[in-house]
Structures are given as structure tokens and as C-alpha cells.
Image (cartoon, coloured by chain):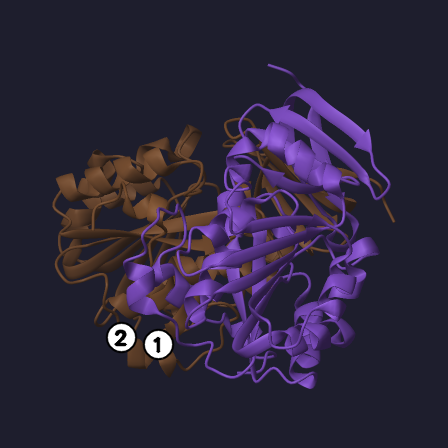
Chain colours: A purple, B brown
Amino acid sequence: MSSHWFTERHESSGSSIGYRLVEQLADEQTPFQRIEIYRTSDWGNLMVIDGCTMLTTRDNFLYHEMMTHPALFTHGAPRDVVIIGGGDCGTLREVLRHPEVASAVQIEIDERVTRLAEEYFPELCESNDDPRARLLFDDGIKFMSDAAPESLDVVIVDSTDPVGPAEGLFNAAFYGTCFRALRTGGILVQQSESPLVLLDLIQSMHKAMREVGFSETRTLPFPQPCYPTGWWSCTMACKGGDLAEFREADAAGKPFATRYYNADIHRAALAQPEFMRAVLPR
Amino acid sequence: MSSHWFTERHESSGSSIGYRLVEQLADEQTPFQRIEIYRTSDWGNLMVIDGCTMLTTRDNFLYHEMMTHPALFTHGAPRDVVIIGGGDCGTLREVLRHPEVASAVQIEIDERVTRLAEEYFPELCESNDDPRARLLFDDGIKFMSDAAPESLDVVIVDSTDPVGPAEGLFNAAFYGTCFRALRTGGILVQQSESPLVLLDLIQSMHKAMREVGFSETRTLPFPQPCYPTGWWSCTMACKGGDLAEFREADAAGKPFATRYYNADIHRAALAQPEFMRAVLPR
């Protein structure tokens, strides 16, 4: 067995996570970033962007299921969905499992992320040819700013960390464009980093989301081994409605298989650990 | 800032977790194992045994709270508690927060673990002088085998991994001694590794626990950044009773502070991800 390891040293938390490698499969410098793909000994394939782990074959189901199904089962009837980022297409695949969805547009800035995902994570891309799917390679911030008012039901922000290209996705200006583009009852959901390390970022997201008019906000924690601390979260905001409730019977009887998400897990993810309850709005 | 890192390479899962170090505080070879203590840049102090991360100052609250409060709030009136292992005394501290507990005996095989914890994790040892506490340094397997029948309410197995000294804590012979020593309504709870990596071990624990007479078994997952995959679990077994129910009002009104556990988190931890539900008994 190879003794080569890829290790991501997460400077801001002073911790690292690594994987035992078998071989490098790709290494590209795109106009936006450096993308590496490795085959690992135990985690399937691994995608790394600018030195940060993006996903592994083995554990991406946790993230992709939790970025989609809670939001889509909270919305009463999600028809028009937009995914900002999400170039590996795993989020798109989960969105398209919902028969109510009529249109899912993915706006990824770097086409090479998607092309490499098609090659090395083909299972995540199996719905890319769905007639309801549209893949754009463009700037998500500009897309949302140009979106027609009240034209969308769910906006999913599946981006990298809030530094570099994704920085502009974590502020009130961007949330304002999402709020405007959502219909009443619409939901914004965004990946919101590790609750243990970036609770101050999560707090600022709640504040900025409410500032632009979202009536309620909630952070749902979930396990995600390949990201710093192994514990991650998404934060939902709604334009009217109640994030504590969801279509529980529909979730329990969902017409598709999952590996993590189910109605009980959805309810469970709404529970707030004491240290989060102490600082986040209810 | 130091550029030294401690990295635990977890061979069986092909993944690693590391911490940025400031300095080494202790390095001892005891009759049982090698214990190292480090000061880290972001995680407080770090205890390593035989190369495996045992705990950090920053994130041990997750493990210690989840190893104790779900079991103690599930039991109707926990009076006599035994902790097998648990040498850092963090589990003991959480147990003693329950006013119903009249006696808590900790049986740790290696006294040096506790003495080093007293020095480098003093906050975990702050209840060691509680008159209800008794610290023994002895073999936990022998202790349980000698325990008087029907003399205990809760047995907590807070051990290292099921290899080496702790191997004998993960089989029907040991569970049989726990079952015998527990009163009716008694609860056994044991750390049960990463649900993502060691689901087959968890299955075998359920099987062995039921074999010796426990009427119900449940695995509760929780985040634990310093352990492989960052996702951990405890498995509970009861001698009669119902593990899906707990003293919810008492948990909601608990007379002590926690940082992770609360009644909602207890209920949430009972939710089973789809891939666990598929293979574990209900």
C-alpha cells in the first residue's frame, strides 16, 4: 500500500485531515483555481481545490443530502430551484430526485469542476441529462442579481469557503438578491461551515439573512468527515413560513433512496446544541 | 507559530487527523501504554495514548456529555454508577452532576492517565474529591466479573478502541457480567466508534448485548472532531425498559449546564441515519 497521504492543514483551526493516496488522477490549473483528483485507499476518489478537500466518493452523501432534502421538504411545493456553485453535480442529482421540481439550474463558475466530476465522480453526474436540469458556467452572484423577482422556490448555495471567489456569497448584498428572486414561501439554504470553529460566521449569516427580509433562519448541523472538524452545517432562511415544520409525511414516504437523510434525521437536525442555542436566534 | 503537528494516521480507515502543536508537556511509558501530552495552538491540551488521540481540551465536552447524560436521563433513578476506563475523569464529572447519583466508581487500569489528567486537564478532575466518587486503579473486566448481582444502575464503558487492553470489553462475556450486575431497569452504555467506519463492530455489539439478555439496544451518533472521521457513537443497552423514552422533563430542566447535550439533542441522537437503520435492530 502506498505511504503517500494528502493532508489538508486547516490553518484557522489548527487542525488537519488527511487521506491515504493510491495515485493522482488529475492536476489542473484552471482560470479560477487548481483542481487535483486522487484515488485514495479507503475513500474512493478525492477532489481537492486550492489545497482544500472538496469531496470524497465515500462521504459526500452526507453533505449533498443535507444541502437539499431538508430545504426541499420544508418548502410546500418546490418547483423552480437554483444551485449556486455545486459544480460536482451531487446537489443537482439530489434536487432532481424530487418529482415536484420542474427546473433546476446549476450556476458553477468553473466548468472544469463539472467536467472532472463527470470523469471521476460519474455517479454524482448521472442526472445531468435530466430534461429539467440546466448547467450554466457563470458567476452565481451576477446570476442572482439578474434573476427575475419572485421567480424561484429554493436557492441552494453550495460553495467553497467564504474566502476568495465565494466571499461574495456570504453577505447581505447577495442575500438581498436571493430574497428578491424567491417567491413567498421560498427558501435559501447555504453551506455554513463548522459550528465548532466558525460559529461567529454562522451568527453573521443569520443577521444578514434577517436584515434583508427573511422571516426565519435555522442552522442544521450534520456530520461531514472530510471537512475541518468533521462536523458541518447548512443554514436555511425562509421568505415567510416556518422552518421548524416540514412535509414530514412526504419525507417519511419519499419515493427515492437516501443513505443519511430521513424524516427522523430532518427533525433531529433541527435540534440545537446548547452552545449554538446560546447565541443563535430562535 | 510552531510548524510542528501531531498527526494520527488511522490505518484501518485510511484517514488522518492532526493538530498544530506548541510544545510537548509530558511523555511517559507506563506499564500499560505510552502517554503523551501536548499543548496545541487551537485545541488546548491534547492527550495521546500509543499514538491515538484520546482527547483535547476543546472538544471533549461532546464525548463526555453524550457518554453520560443520555444514559442517566433514560434510567428512572440512577443511584449506583460504574465507569470502566474513563481515566481522564471527564465522564465521572458529568455523572456526578446528577443529584440522584449516590455512588460513582471509576475503574481505570492505568493510574498515570488520571494523574496526568489532574495536571493537564484539571477541569475534568474537579469532581474527583466528591464524597460520592471512588477512583480505583484496576482491571475493569475483573471488577465487573466480581460485582455483586443487581447492585448497579448504570455501567459506562469509556474505553480505548477494541484492540489491545480494551478488546475484552467488546464481547458477550463482558456484557454478561454487566447484565448480571445491573438491577432491573439498569443501563449499559459503551463508546462504539465511528458509525461510518465500524458499523460492523456496532452490529456485533448489538448482537452480543442482546444475546446476554439486554432487552433493547440503541446506537446514538454524535460529533467528535478529534476521533477518526470526526463522527462517533455510544451504544446503550437496557435490562428492561425502553431506550426510546427518557426523563425528558428532567433533561429539559436539568440543574446543571452543558455545552452540547439538552433534551432536544437527546431526542435527536435517537434518530437513525438511513444506512444505520438498514442494519441495526430497532
Answer whether residue B227 is visible to the viewer in this image. no
Under mark 1, the amino acid is Ala
Let me know if marks 2 and 1 both belong to one chain.
yes
Give the percent coordinates (x, y) of residue B119: 63, 55
Q: Which residue is mark 1?
A: B251
The answer for which chain carries disc 2 is: B
Answer whether residue B185 is visible to the viewer in this image. yes
Give the percent coordinates (x, y) of residue B89: 48, 57
Q: Which residue is mark 2?
A: B247
Q: Viewed as shown, does residue B208 lie left or right of B166?
A: left
Q: Give the class, few, some or many, for how many residues have Cα within 10 Å of label 2's Cα (few <14, many ≥20).
A: some
Q: Secondary structure at mark 2?
A: loop
Answer yes or no: do the residues labelled 2 and 1 have beta carbons within 8 Å? yes
Q: Which of the pair B29/B262 is nearer the observer?
A: B262
Q: Secondary structure at mark 1?
A: helix
Q: Quadrant of residue B118?
A: bottom right
